[in-house]
């Protein structure tokens, strides 16, 4: 497994986690209304989850489990990306393309996390 790949995945998760706290409003707007509680609570919870996943992926002892949980997390947040694409359907072509591009963009993220998990299990 590439140490660079692990660092990049952990960095992506950590960076996203931090932005959930530093600039939460964009995340609040894509929380599906069907979820109970406030959008901000979900934003904070998902940010905390991303920070925890970043730590788990970064540490060799928890890397496999952390990467598997990361793949599941990427699947779990897909409905927020669908909501964003729907909500942005009338925005400028650039923003609409960005929102629509996030949908298939989840697939490589899931595959990346699964590869990190597979590679980590070979090292155990």
Image: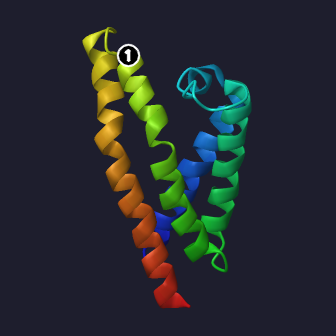
Judging depth in this view, the residue of 62 and 76 nearest the camera is 76
Judging depth in this view, the residue of 117 and 60 nearest the camera is 117
> Does residue 44 sit above or below 96 in this rendering?
below
* Image quadrant in which the C terminus is located: bottom right
Residue 82, image quadrant: top left
> Does residue 67 sit above or below 82 in this rendering?
below
Residue 83, image quadrant: top left
Judging depth in this view, the residue of 103 and 38 nearest the camera is 38
* x and y percentages locating residue 95 in the rendered image: 34, 17
* Image quadrant in which the N terminus is located: bottom left
Q: Residues within 10 Å of mark 1 (few under 14, many from 20)?
A: some
Q: In the rendered view, does 89 fall on the left or right side of 122?
A: left
Q: How is the image coloured?
A: rainbow
Q: Which residue is mark 1?
A: 88
Q: Residue at x 62, y 67 (%)?
A: 58
* x and y percentages locating residue 49 in the rendered image: 67, 50
Report the label total: 1
> In the structure shown, which secondary structural element does the residue marked by tag 1 occupy?
loop
> Does residue 108 sit above or below 96 in this rendering?
below
Residue 17, image quadrant: top right
Q: Residue at x 48, y 60 (%)?
A: 71
Q: Residue at x 51, y 89 (%)?
A: 123
* x and y percentages locating residue 113 in the rendered image: 45, 63
Q: In the rendered view, does 86 fall on the left or right side of 120?
A: left
Judging depth in this view, the residue of 50 and 5 nearest the camera is 50
């Amino acid at each position: 497994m590439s140490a660079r790949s692990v660092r990049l995945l952990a960095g992506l998760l950590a960076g996203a986690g931090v932005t959930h706290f530093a600039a939460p409003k964009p995340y609040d707007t894509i929380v599906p209304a069907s979820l109970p509680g406030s959008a901000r609570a979900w934003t904070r919870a998902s940010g905390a989850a991303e920070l925890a996943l970043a730590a788990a992926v970064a540490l060799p002892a928890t890397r496999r489990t952390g990467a598997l949980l990361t793949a599941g997390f990427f699947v779990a947040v897909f409905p927020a990306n669908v909501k964003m694409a729907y909500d942005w359907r009338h925005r400028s072509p650039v923003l609409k393309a960005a929102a629509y591009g996030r949908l298939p963009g989840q697939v490589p993220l899931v595959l990346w996390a699964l590869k990190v998990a597979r590679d980590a299990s070979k090292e155990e």
